[in-house]
Amino acid sequence: MPFHWDKPIADSDEAIGTFGNCSGGVTPWGTILTCEENYDAFYGEIYYENNERRSTKGRLGWEKYYDRPPEHYGWVVEVDPMTGSAKKLVALGRFMHECATLYEGKDKRLVVYSGDDEAERCLYKFISSEPGSLKNGKLYVACLEEGLWKSLDINDDPRLKKKFKDQTEIQVRAREAAYIVGGTMLDRPEDIEIDPLTGHVLVSLTNNFPKGNYHGSILKIKEKENDH
């Protein structure tokens, strides 16, 4: 399954399959988006120590039989149901995507909202560069305290340029990048819906047991002038 990106991911232009598939969405051109959630259970996760790549092992132990790099999973996958072809959308970032809620703007470019389904993780928004494609665009993280969507583009924040070598590394390590620019940590952001009457973005925050939040809440985001 190819990565829909111009540079390799963990030294490869393609990944073997997809798993941990959760919710997703449907594009205006009829393809299906499905999200790779809880990928760390299968092949573990990467982390960096003194700028050296390390990885943990997955609790399911898949690496014992089919050793794959963790970086190949945790993406949104676009599937064409008519042909069966599929590709991994690197531009939308790598994290525990719960959903991919789409909004088509007046200029026909797509906005995709997605939550990182784990406690103390963030909410993201992707805006495509052009209509009819999710290959290129800009990824943002919600900074609720400031009422802003912070860009995760390496050219928009010197802190990102200092930490990461290129944009591909930011896409792979989107969680780290989100924290660096001040992304708000939330209580397991899961499903996202856009109110068809008001245009408000409604985010289901499931729970956060360590903080005593057992029943969750609904986060409502009002985009400025309903311009997503």
Image (cartoon, rainbow, N blue to C red):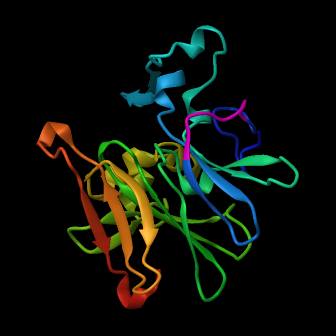
Q: Residue 222: horizontal and vertical position, in percent?
A: 33, 80
Q: Which one is nearer the viewer's eye here, 156 or 75?
A: 75
Residue 110 location, quadrant: bottom right
Occupied quadrant, residue 3: top right
| Image vertical order of residue 53 relative to residue 223, above or below | above
Residue lying at the far right of the rendered structure: 83
Whether residue 27 is situated above or below residue 96 in the rendered picture:
below
Among all residues in the image, which is located at the extreme top? 64
Instruction: Identify the image quadrant of residue 195.
Output: bottom left
Is 173 situated left or right of 123 in this image?
Answer: right
Identify the residue at horizontal 47%, vertical 28% (top origin).
40
Residue 20 lies in the magenta-colored region: yes
- Characterize the magenta stretch by its predominant secondary structure: loop
In the image, residue 62 lies at what x, y percent?
58, 15
Residue 54, position as x, y percentages in the image:
45, 22
Say which of 126 and 47 sits in front.
Answer: 126
Q: Which residue is drawn at 53% across and 23% down?
A: 42
Magenta highlight range? 15-22
Q: Is residue 181 left or right of residue 60?
A: left
